[in-house]
Amino acid sequence: MKKLLVTGASGFLGWNVFKVQPPDWRLIGTWNKHEDGLWPRSENYQLDLRDKDAVWKCLKEINPDAVLHLAAFSDTNFCEENPEKAKELNVDATATLAGMCADRHVHLLFTSSEQVFDGTKEAYQESDAPNPKNEYGRQKLEAEQLVQAIYPEASVVRISVMYGLASAARPGFLQKWLDAWQHFFPVKAFYDEYRSFLGGASAARGLFHLLGQQASGIFHIGGDQGLSRYDLALLVKERFRLEHAPVEICSQKDVNMPAFRPPRLVLDNSLIAGTGFQPMPLDQELDALVQEFKLPPPFSDN
Ligand SMILES: NC(=O)c1ccc[n+]([C@@H]2O[C@H](COP(=O)([O-])OP(=O)(O)OC[C@H]3O[C@@H](n4cnc5c(N)ncnc54)[C@H](OP(=O)(O)O)[C@@H]3O)[C@@H](O)[C@H]2O)c1
């Protein structure tokens, strides 16, 4: 069985990667501060990726066939306000890991983001020129370029903003909406933030698809359709049968945020589709989540 080292296994996507783990991979996940973010009883390794000696020791001890690099400071506002701290992990540690993987001839898949784009195009293909508009996007782009220069055989996968289920340590925004509705609080949702929202499980399946092919180069994985955060909130209400859950429509301008958020970021999936992978359609993925979310009363009455 092939061995996969997953950095950032205690994060949102890491949890989903362990959830959809195919039988031909043995997974070992790293965590830094949140052991409680790990998938229950998963094989794990505590690692601060900023510590080069520790990273080398980890690679030597585990001797993986491939590394799936998810660990990052992924909060755009945090990166905007703490650029140096974020860069140590998002850029410097990523470059170090790429160098070590190249030295050891271990395949590397690095996860990047839609935020490398500026939001001026209808939908972005891999060949489109990046032009990040916030610090997180700039760091992800710098890391992409370093990974490709250091280890050209690596793959770089840009992912759209994800929804879904994860651990209590890293609830995604969907969980936060459901929690708010459970307490009869309204959810505020932007009508002017348009994204190809991607299910965490679909994202993880797409990553395993590319790992299985040892693909090199840049790939996009986005959801099957673009819609505003407000329209997504209405759809979630409908699929979860929460007709009375309150949603307040608002504009990005109504909320003071440190990081600029491009109004429209949609990733074109044609390239990965050509290799045989399609993310689950939004309606179906939401319906699958309805079955998985343990909704407490009063939801259970719906
Ligand atoms: N979430 C999204 O919607 C989204 C969208 C597009 C792209 N992405 C990309 O997808 C990847 C995964 O994102 P995510 O949402 O799963 O991130 P996340 O939930 O914020 O998790 C971040 C992970 O990084 C780990 N980490 C933080 N500091 C570390 C350090 N010094 N050393 C080692 N590990 C450290 C965390 O470990 P501890 O918690 O244990 O400290 C955690 O496992 C990232 O590359 C992100 O840029 C995410």
Image (tube, rainbow, N blue to C red):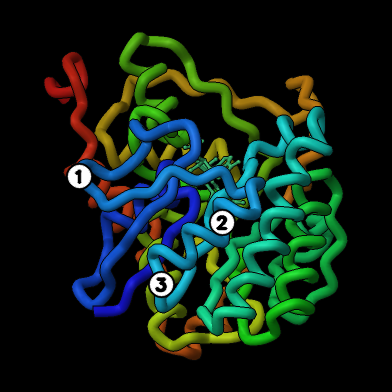
> Which quarter shows the N terminus?
bottom left
Q: Residue placed at 57% from the left, 23% from the top?
A: 188
Quarter of the rendered image showing ligand 1: top right
Q: CA distance from mark 2 to mark 3?
A: 13 Å
**Label 2 secondary element:** helix
- Residue 30, placed above or below residue 209: above
**Which of the labelled discs sits on residue 64, or is there none?**
3
| Residue situated in front as seen by the camera: 251 or 72 | 72
Q: Residue placed at 84% from the left, 55% from the top?
A: 132
Instruction: Please name the residue that numbered disc 2 is placed on.
Output: 55
Contact flag, marks 1 and 3 (Cβ < 8 Å) = no
139 left or right of 179 in image = right
Specify which label sits upstream in the sequence, 1 or 3: 1
Q: Residue placed at 69% from the left, 80% from the top?
A: 151
> Which quarter shows the C terminus?
top left
Q: Give the amino acid at mark 2.
A: Val
Specify which label sits upstream in the sequence, 2 or 3: 2
Instruction: Please name the residue that numbered disc 1 is placed on.
Output: 41
Residue 150 visible to an observer of this rendering: yes
Q: Position of residue 259 (x, y in %)?
A: 80, 34
| Residue situated in front as seen by the camera: 199 or 57 | 57
Q: Position of residue 208 (x, y in %)?
A: 38, 73
Specify which label sits upstream in the sequence, 1 or 2: 1
Q: Residue placed at 64% from the left, 41% from the top?
A: 73
Q: Give the amino acid at mark 1.
A: Arg
Q: CA distance from mark 1 to mark 3?
A: 19 Å
Query: Can you tell which of label 1 and label 2 is closer to the viewer?
Result: 2
Q: Position of residue 137 (x, y in %)?
A: 77, 52
